[in-house]
Every structure is written in structure tokens, then in C-alpha cells.
Amino acid sequence: MDEATYYRDHWVEVEPERLNAYTEMFKWRPEMEPILAPADLKAGQTVLDYGCGPGGLMLELARRAGLAGHVHGVDLNLEFTGLARKALAEAGYGAATTVHHVTNDAIPLPDGSVDRLVCKNVMEYVPDINATLSEFRRVVKPGGLAHIIDSDWGMLVVEPLGAAKLNELFEAAKLAYHTPHAGRLLYGGLKKAGFAKVSVRILASADVRGHMLMVVQNMVSYAKIGGKIDPGRADSMLAEVRQSISDGTYMMVLPQFLVTAQA
Ligand SMILES: C[S@@+](CC[C@H](N)C(=O)[O-])C[C@H]1O[C@@H](n2cnc3c(N)ncnc32)[C@H](O)[C@@H]1O
């Protein structure tokens, strides 16, 4: 494990259990509609899903662009790109979609080639946010939109851990997030990249049932890999969160920045 590149390596190589869990977790669900609404997606558009993962969101983008449109997906992980291609073909969108496996941060599309660019929960993992936002500006057509949905881990709440314990856990897990405060950097970053109009909304809801437990499980496993916390202490934090789900006192909030920019 190379600590300096772990934020990227843990996406290039995803263990089989995490792969299956992500495929389930990243599926599109109708209650996610508000995160996509500002992207103003329409039939016939050419759309890019940057960091498409196993294709859950990409499939929804393909439904919206329809067979007259085209959706490109780009991802670092080879298995994810294979799963996305398979899911899209099975749903009848094989010919209206292209999934690109990439090994660097250049987008394999020409300048001004997409009407819409959607990027969900990827920016904290890119090595240089400003370089990636410049790539976004390059590929979006004049008048087109880039719509980024992302977290800012400085705004994470996981009860009953409290601020001090959560901070201790996140500090130990930080190697997995290149830019943990990505959310707050997007507005200014998109302006600096040359987008004309940029708008920001924040969407926050409280998970009180444990749907987002995987986020804490991942943090604990990253923290243990990083070696900056006693593994038993990290496990006891996870046990505390699990117990609170059983006894009904758990709450998790991870606000999402929805940042939409016109080229
Ligand atoms: C948290 S997942 C989000 C997946 C998907 N966007 C979603 O929300 O359902 C992050 C995704 O970004 C991909 N990724 C991370 N860094 C990347 C990069 N530099 N270029 C392309 N994809 C990247 C990962 O492989 C992974 O599929």
C-alpha cells in the first residue's frame, strides 16, 4: 500500500466484496431525483458521466438521453466499466452508450463534444481538482452544463460518535480521500475553469435507518489500512454505530453539494 496514491489505488483495485456492495449502493433510486434535476437532461443530448462506476447513474442518464442521444461513461476501474457496459447492453442502451476505461485524468473525448457532464462523488478522489475542472470545461459545448454532485467530508455527522471521535476516525482514514473538502471548492473552481454561470445548492437529509453504514465501514477499513489508529479502537467505533442502529439512536448526515455550471 502506497499512502501517497491510495486515494486512487483503492479505486483501481476494488476487492470483490466491495465491488458487489458498490454495485448495489450506486444503483439509481427514484428518490435521488433532486440530485439530478439541475442537470436539465433531455432526450437526444450527448452526456458524459465522469466516474461512472458500475453504471447505476449512467443507466438513468441513458434512459433520459434516449436512443437518439448518447451517453459516455468514464472510469478508472476496469471491473466497473465491464459491469456498466453489461448493464447498459441488457437494458437495450448498448448502441447509445460508450464506456471508456481510463488510466489517467484526461477525458477521451474531443473539445466541445457534450451537452451535459454529470459527475457524482468523484472529485474528492482526483489528484488535481482544478485540472479536472479544466477538462470538464474543455469537453462541454458552449451553452452546455456541467453538473457536479459531491460531498464535503468536513460536514459529516455520525451520531453517536460525536465530533472528537469522528474526527479521530476520519483523520486516520484520510489517505483514501485526496481532497476531503471537495464540496466547498467546486463553486470557485468551476468559475476559475472558465464556466460562465455557476449555481450551488446543498441537499442534506438524515439517515436514521443505517442505509449509509457502508460509508462508516469503509472509513474504518481505510483507517486500519492507514495504520494511524489502533485497529481495535476503529472496530469499537463501528460497533458503537451498529449498536445505535439497533437501539434507534443512530443518525448520519453527509450533505451533498449540487454545483451546476454553464459553459
Ligand atoms: C464513489 S464512486 C461514485 C460512482 C458513481 N459516480 C456514483 O455516484 O454512483 C467514485 C468513482 O469514481 C471513479 N474514479 C475515481 N477517480 C477517478 C479518476 N481520476 N478518473 C475517473 N474515475 C475515477 C472510481 O473508480 C469510482 O467508480
Image (tube, rainbow, N blue to C red):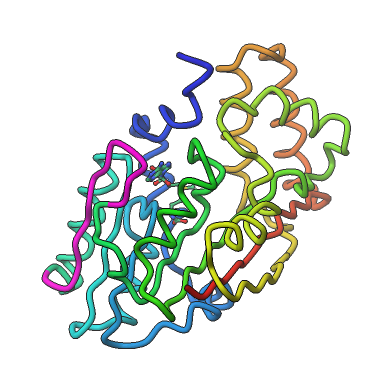
Residue at 74% across, 51% down: 252
Q: Toward the viewer: 110 or 181?
A: 110
In the displayed structure, would residue 103 be above or below residue 137?
above
In the displayed structure, would residue 6 be above or below residue 99?
above
In the displayed structure, would residue 37 be above or below residue 211?
below
Residue at 32% across, 58% down: 55
Residue at 69% across, 44% down: 181
Quarter of the figure with residue 38: bottom right
Quarter of the figure with residue 61: bottom left
Residue 154 is situated, as x and y percent measured from the top left of the image, at 76, 44
Would you say residue 36 sits in the magenta stretch? no
The region drawn magenta spans 95-107
Quarter of the figure with residue 110: bottom left
- The mark tally for this picture is 0
Residue 192 is situated, as x and y percent measured from the top left of the image, at 59, 57
* 167 left or right, relative to 116: right
Would you say residue 96 sits in the magenta stretch? yes
* 201 left or right, relative to 131: right
Residue 150 is situated, as x and y percent measured from the top left of the image, at 59, 56
Residue 113 is situated, as x and y percent measured from the top left of the image, at 28, 69
Q: Quadrant of the N terminus?
A: top left
Q: Toward the viewer: 29 or 6?
A: 6
In the displayed structure, would residue 202 be above or below residue 103?
below
